Each structure stands twice: as structure tokens, then as C-alpha cells.
Amino acid sequence: ARRLPRRSILIVDPDAASRALVEAVLKGDHWVRGAPTGQEAIDAYDAPRAFDYVILDVALMGPPSGAEVLLALRKKDPKARIILLTQLASDSELVRKCMPQAYALLRKPEGLKDVRDLLT
């Protein structure tokens, strides 16, 4: 079987259990770094293409909020592949506002199983 390339992934989620679950799903195949706050995520993304993917809980309360983190990362790297992972409904105002800037949208908790497939 052909081995998939290892990707660098930043997981931004204030919920330690959710963050740990995503890390556990991905860390066998990828290099993973977790960030419990938006500011830590912004600081970690220190250069364009610093990470292959960012998995962001868009409902991050902040400051900075999830939407602000999304915009800050886009400013640092317009081509950043940012996956929104949220419990919010896909038609919520926040999700509708952020989706045009996102690579994909996954719902918690059922979307967690799709994270690995999305990165291949």
C-alpha cells in the first residue's frame, strides 16, 4: 500500500477533549499541534504555509474570536487551508460569514470521523 505524505496540522479548539480526540485521530499519520486559544494559533502560524491545514473551531469565544482567527490566518497566508469544525448549524450567521474563507466545514461530533479523509 502506498503511504500518504505526512501533513502538518494545527488544531484550534478550546475544548481539551475535542482537541485531544482530533489529535488522536490524526497524529499517527500526521504532525499535529494543538492550540487551545486563538492567540496561540495566530502566534503558531508564524510564516506562510506554516501548516498544511488548520482545523479551527469557528465558535471560539476569544478574544480573538474564531472569525477573527480565521481572518488573521488568511492575512498571514491567503492560501491557508482552514477547515471549520463546529457544533453550530451550517446556516448559522457565524458559519455563513466564515464559509467563503474556509477550505471545508465539518460538524462536531459526527464530522470528526471525516477529518482524516479530508486530509488525504
Image (tube, grey):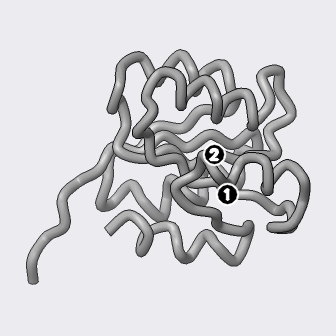
Residue 85, numbered label: 1
Task: Give the farthest residue toward the right.
Answer: 93
Amino acid on which the number 1 mark rests in the picture = Leu
> Could you tell whether 20 is left or right of 59 in the image?
left
Badge 2: residue crowd in 10 Å (few <14, some 14–19, many ≥20): many
Q: CA distance from mark 1 to mark 2?
A: 6 Å
Residue at figure coordinates x 78%, y 48% from the top left: 97
Figure quadrant of the N terminus: bottom left
| Picture quadrant of residue 71 | top right
Q: Is residue 11 above or below residue 118?
A: above
Q: Nearer the viewer, residue 15 or 114?
A: 114
Amino acid on which the number 2 mark rests in the picture = Leu
Q: Earlier in the sequence, mark 1 or mark 2?
A: 2
Q: Position of residue 120 (x, y in %)?
A: 31, 69
Q: Position of residue 119 (x, y in %)?
A: 38, 63
Residue 56, numbered label: 2
Contact, mark 1 vs mark 2 (Cβ under 8 Å): yes
Q: Position of residue 29 (x, y in %)?
A: 30, 60
